[in-house]
C-alpha cells in the first residue's frame, strides 16, 4: 500500500503473465465452441421436430422403430394407437405370437390375433419391400414384448430394487467422497494455486474460490443425475415415464424456440435469434475486456502517463469499442439502425423527464473526464470527507477516506460545489500550525525552536523551506504561525501531530512555557446597608419576631421536661 500520494502516483501496472492471457483465450474458445455446439443441436432438433413426418414406436421407454404418415393419419396418430396396445400386451401372462398377415393387399402385424399396425409404402425405405419391412418389425416387436414380460416378473423386480439401493449407496458415498477429496487433497493444491494467482494480481482471481465450489456442486449433481437415470432404467414404468418426460420437454422446448417472440419490420425473431445476439454481445464484452487489459499492461505501462491519464485513455477506448461493436452487431443481426435512432429519441425524452439526476451525473462525469480537474489518485476534500479518488465512473466517483472507508459521491456534486483538490497540478501543499507562548519568552528563540522541529521531520520539505510568522500579541500569549511544505497532503493529520509533539518537547527544553487561557472576574457591589421598601421591612420584622417567639417556647418546654 503506498504511504503517500507521490508513491501512489508512481505505482505501475504489473505485467499480467502470458499464461493468464492464454488461459483467457482458451476459455473464450471453449465457450464459443459450446455455444456453437448448442446452436447446432438446436438446429438438428429443429429438423426433427414433432411436425416431422415420422414418430417412434416405444415400449417401456425403449424405441423400436419409426412410422411415417399414411393417408389421412399422421405419424403421431399411428404411433399413439400402437403405443397404447404394447404395454397391455406385455402385461399378459401368456406366450405372445407375432405374425404378419395380408389385409387390403398390404402386410399387417397382429399379436395373438389382435391387429397392431399396417405397413404402408411411406414406411418402407428404398430397396426394400413392404412385406420384408413388416417381417423385420414383427421380429423386433416379438423380442421387445418378451423382454417387457421378463422385466415384469417378481424375480427381475427384486433384482432391480437391489441394484437401485446399491446405486443410491454408491451415489451417497461419491457425494461424501468428492467433498472430502475436494477439501483435503485437491483443496490445498488449488488453494496454493489461488494464492499464486492472487499475488500476480490477475483479473478475477478472487472469484476462483466461487468457481471451484461451483464445480464441486456440479460434480455432485452429475453423480445424482447418473444414479437416478440408472434407477429409472431398471423399472419399466419409470423408464417409460422418463422417456415421456424428456420427449415432451424436447417437444415443448422446440416449439418454444420456433415460436416468434416479436417482430421488427417484416422479420420475426425467435429465442434462437436472441440467444445468438446475447452470445455475440458476450463475445464483444469479453473481447473489449481483454483488449483493455492488453492496453493497460502492454501499451500504457510503457508510457509515462500518470494514473489519471491512463484511466481516461482506457475508458475512452472501452466506450468506443463497445459503441462501435454494438452498432455493427445490431446491423449484422438485422436491426435497422433507423429504429435504433427512434428508440434513442424516445429514451432521450424519458431521460429528460424521469432520469434527470442520472443524466446530470453522467454529464458531470464527462466533464470531469475531459476537464481533468479531478483525476484518479488525487487527494481531495469535499465536506465532510477527505480522501483519495479511487475510481471515476459514469455516475459517481469512489472516494477512499483516511479511515479506508469507500464513499460514493455523485459526479454532479463535484461539479456544482467547491472541492479542495490537494493534488491538483502539483501535490506539494503548505500546512499552518498555530503556536502560542508566554510573554516572557524570547521571540527569536521561539522561532529557532519551531524551525528546528520542522527541519527534523522527514515528511517536511526543505525546499521550499519552513518559515515562522509572528502573528501578534494575543490575550494571554505571543502568537506564532509555523508554515511547512509537504508532498504528502493525505498524511497532514499525522504530520501536524508529530510536529506538535516535537514542538512541545523543544519548548520545554528551552524553558519556554505555553500559557493556558486566563480570565479575571470583577464583582461590582451596590450601597450598604441594603435598604428595602417600608412594607417589606415591616413584614420582615414580624417574621423575625414570630421565629424568636417559637424558639423561646421550644427551649422552655425542653427545660421543663428535663427537670
Image (cartoon, rainbow, N blue to C red):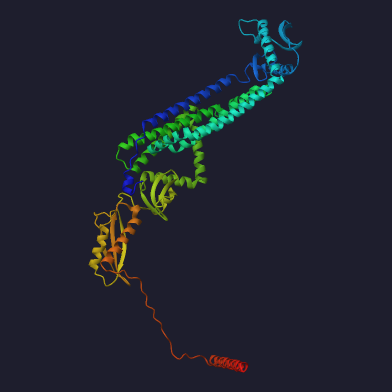
Q: Residue at x 43, y 43 (%)?
A: 394
Of the pair 556 and 327, the residue shown nearer to us: 556
**Where the C terminus falls, by quadrant?**
bottom right
Of the pair 190 and 323, the residue shown nearer to us: 190
Residue 401 screen position, x and y as percent: 41, 51
Task: Judge left or right: residue 466 versus residue 422.
Answer: left
Of the pair 470 and 237, the residue shown nearer to us: 237
Task: Judge left or right: residue 107 versus residue 509.
Answer: right
Is residue 260 in view from this perspective?
no
Residue 239 screen position, x and y as percent: 65, 22
Image height check: is 257 above or below 428? above
Determine the residue located farthest toward the right in the rendered image. 113
Task: Judge left or right: residue 280 versus residue 246.
Answer: left
Image height check: is 360 above or below 145? below
Is residue 498 in view from this perspective?
yes
Residue 131 screen position, x and y as percent: 68, 5
Amino acid at each position: 500500500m503506498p504511504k503517500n500520494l507521490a508513491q501512489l502516483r508512481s505505482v505501475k501496472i504489473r505485467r499480467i503473465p502470458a499464461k493468464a492471457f492464454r488461459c483467457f483465450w482458451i476459455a473464450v474458445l471453449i465457450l464459443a465452441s459450446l455455444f456453437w455446439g448448442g446452436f447446432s443441436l438446436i438446429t438438428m432438433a429443429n429438423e426433427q421436430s414433432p411436425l416431422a413426418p415420422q414418430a417412434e414406436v416405444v415400449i417401456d421407454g425403449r424405441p423400436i422403430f419409426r412410422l411415417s404418415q399414411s393417408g389421412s393419419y399422421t405419424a403421431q396418430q399411428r404411433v399413439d394407437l400402437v403405443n397404447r396396445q404394447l404395454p397391455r400386451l406385455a402385461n399378459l401372462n401368456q406366450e405372445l405370437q407375432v405374425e404378419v398377415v395380408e389385409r387390403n393387399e398390404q402386410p399387417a402385424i397382429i399379436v395373438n390375433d389382435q391387429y397392431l399396425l399396417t405397413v404402408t409404402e411411406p414406411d418402407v425405405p428404398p430397396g426394400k419391400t413392404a412385406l420384408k419391412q413388416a417381417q423385420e418389425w414383427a421380429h423386433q416387436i416379438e423380442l421387445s414384448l418378451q423382454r417387457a414380460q421378463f422385466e415384469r416378473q417378481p424375480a427381475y423386480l427384486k433384482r432391480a430394487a437391489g441394484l437401485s439401493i446399491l446405486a443410491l449407496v454408491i451415489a451417497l458415498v461419491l457425494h461424501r467422497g468428492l467433498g472430502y477429496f475436494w477439501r483435503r487433497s485437491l483443496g490445498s493444491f488449488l488453494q496454493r494455486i489461488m494464492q499464486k494467482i492472487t499475488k500476480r494480481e490477475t483479473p478475477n482471481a478472487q472469484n476462483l474460490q466461487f468457481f471451484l465450489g461451483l464445480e464441486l456442486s456440479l460434480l455432485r449433481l452429475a453423480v445424482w443425475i447418473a444414479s437416478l437415470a440408472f434407477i429409472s432404467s431398471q423399472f419399466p414404468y419409470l423408464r417409460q415415464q422418463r422417456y415421456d418426460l424428456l420427449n415432451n420437454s424436447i417437444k415443448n422446448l422446440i416449439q418454444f424456440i420456433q415460436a416468434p417472440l416479436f417482430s421488427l419490420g417484416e422479420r420475426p425473431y425467435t429465442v434462437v435469434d436472441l440467444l445468438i445476439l446475447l452470445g455475440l454481445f458476450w463475445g464483444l464484452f469479453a473481447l473489449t475486456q481483454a483488449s483493455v487489459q492488453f492496453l493497460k499492461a502492454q501499451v500504457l505501462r510503457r508510457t509515462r502517463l500518470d494514473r489519471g491519464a491512463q484511466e481516461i485513455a482506457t475508458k475512452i477506448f472501452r466506450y468506443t469499442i463497445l459503441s462501435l461493436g454494438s452498432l455493427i452487431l445490431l446491423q449484422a443481426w438485422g436491426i435497422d439502425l433507423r429504429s435504433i435512432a427512434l428508440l434513442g429519441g424516445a429514451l432521450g425524452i424519458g431521460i429528460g423527464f424521469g432520469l434527470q439526476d442520472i443524466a446530470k451525473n453522467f454529464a458531470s462525469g464527462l466533464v470531469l473526464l475531459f476537464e481533468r480537474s479531478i483525476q484518479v489518485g488525487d487527494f481531495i476534500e469535499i465536506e465532510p470527507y477527505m480522501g483519495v479518488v479511487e475510481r471515476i465512473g459514469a455516475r459517481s466517483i469512489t472516494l477512499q477516506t483516511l479511515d479506508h472507508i469507500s464513499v460514493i459521491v455523485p459526479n454532479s456534486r463535484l461539479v456544482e460545489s467547491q472541492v479542495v483538490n490537494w493534488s491538483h497540478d502539483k501535490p506539494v501543499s503548505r500546512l499552518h500550525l498555530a503556536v502560542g507562548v508566554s510573554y516572557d519568552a524570547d521571540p527569536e528563540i521561539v522561532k529557532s525552536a519551531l524551525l528546528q522541529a520542522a527541519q527534523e521531520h522527514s515528511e517536511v520539505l526543505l525546499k521550499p523551506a519552513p518559515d515562522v510568522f509572528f502573528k501578534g500579541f494575543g490575550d494571554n500569549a505571543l502568537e506564532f504561525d509555523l508554515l511547512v511544505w509537504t508532498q504528502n497532503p493525505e498524511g497532514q493529520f499525522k504530520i501536524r501531530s508529530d510536529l506538535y509533539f516535537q514542538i512541545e518537547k523543544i519548548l520545554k527544553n528551552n524553558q519556554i512555557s505555553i500559557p493556558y487561557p486566563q480570565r479575571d472576574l470583577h464583582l461590582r457591589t451596590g450601597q450598604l446597608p441594603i435598604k428595602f421598601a417600608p412594607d417589606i421591612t415591616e413584614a420582615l420584622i414580624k417574621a423575625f419576631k414570630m421565629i424568636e417567639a417559637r424558639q423561646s417556647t421550644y427551649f422552655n418546654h425542653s427545660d421543663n421536661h428535663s427537670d
